Amino acid sequence: MKLSLIILNYESAGLVRECIRGIHAARLALSYEIIVVDNNSGDGVGAMLARSFPGVRFIGSPVNGGCAAGNNLGLLAAQGAYALILNPDIAVLPGAVETLVTFLDAHPDAALVAPQLVNPDGTTQLSCFRFPDPLIPILRRTPLGNLPGARRRLRAYLLTSWDHTDTRTVDWVLGACMLVRMEAVERVGLMDERFFLYFEDVDWCRRFWAAGYKIYYHPASRMVHYHRRLSAVNPGLKGILSASTRVHIVSGLRYFAKYGFHR
């Protein structure tokens, strides 16, 4: 089998339904399987799949172990040479998956390739980045990010000086949609489950680079991402201590404890 598509669900059964419909509508020109992993959300996604998509493989986790742990369950079950990790709020456009697969076929140095993610209005989302330094999570999550020096630092991290229209290697890509070579996963390992949410994608890409692989951004493949990334939102003083902010900063501290407090 060429490809395993892995969709991780947490209380998003409706989005999972639409994501699978989009995959089927795209009529992928390759052999593939769809795996849905549910992080103990209790939203009836398993029953919905059995009723509407009996050919989809379902894995129900007894606990919500987080993003890395959930995706790892899918990766362990995957039978494809490549695995496409998808958030349920991704709309797969016709030809986009095949474009990514063709790219990995032609680039044996690549562990992972990501498409261009666009908003529903067609504007480009920022989905590939430089490796962060310790201030980045704080600057993105607090009003400190509005300071002039901080804005320059964030622009460099976000690669905003580039128009994102050409293929290139990047430090890391957003885990909402990425195609990974399973041979590379077998060599480097699964996602680090110490990252419940945020930084699991940064860490994985960093480990692939350390093993001699490359990470690519390939905008010839385009998919729609319907979610505004929470970690990209500067919440102001009111939101500094939100649960999402706390999780993001805790994951950041774990990441920098693992690799050192440098980029």
Image (cartoon, rainbow, N blue to C red):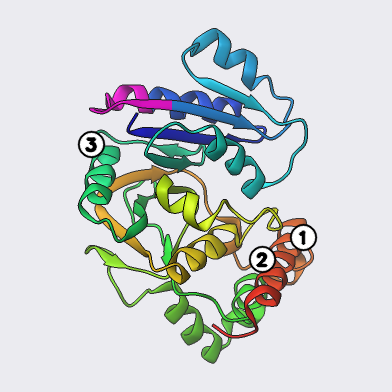
**What quarter of the picture does the C terminus occupy?**
bottom right
- 217, above or below 33, in the image: below
- Mark 1, other Cα within 10 Å: few <14 / some 14–19 / many ≥20: few
1 and 2 marks in contact (CB < 8 Å): yes
Label 1 or label 2, whichever lies nearer to me, is: 1
Secondary structure under the numbered disc 1 in the rendered image = loop
Q: Which amino acid type is marked by label 1? A: Ser
**Which dot marks residue 95?**
3
Label 2 or label 3, whichever lies nearer to me, is: 3
Percent of width and height locating residue 51: 55, 8
Does 70 sit left or right of 167 as displayed? right
Magenta extent: 23-33
Q: Residue beneath label 2, please?
A: 235
Q: Is residue 181 visible?
A: no
2 and 3 marks in contact (CB < 8 Å): no
Percent of width and height locating residue 25: 31, 23
Q: Disc 2 and disc 3: Cα gap in Å? A: 37 Å
- Mark 2, other Cα within 10 Å: few <14 / some 14–19 / many ≥20: some
Percent of width and height locating residue 149: 53, 91
Front residue (pair 219, 206): 206
- 255, above or below 183, in the image: below
- State the residue lying farthest toward the bottom: 149
Front residue (pair 191, 67): 191
- Magenta highlight on residue 30: yes
Q: Residue beneath label 1, please?
A: 242
Residue 62 quadrant: top right
Say which label, 2 or 3, has the lower sequence index. Answer: 3
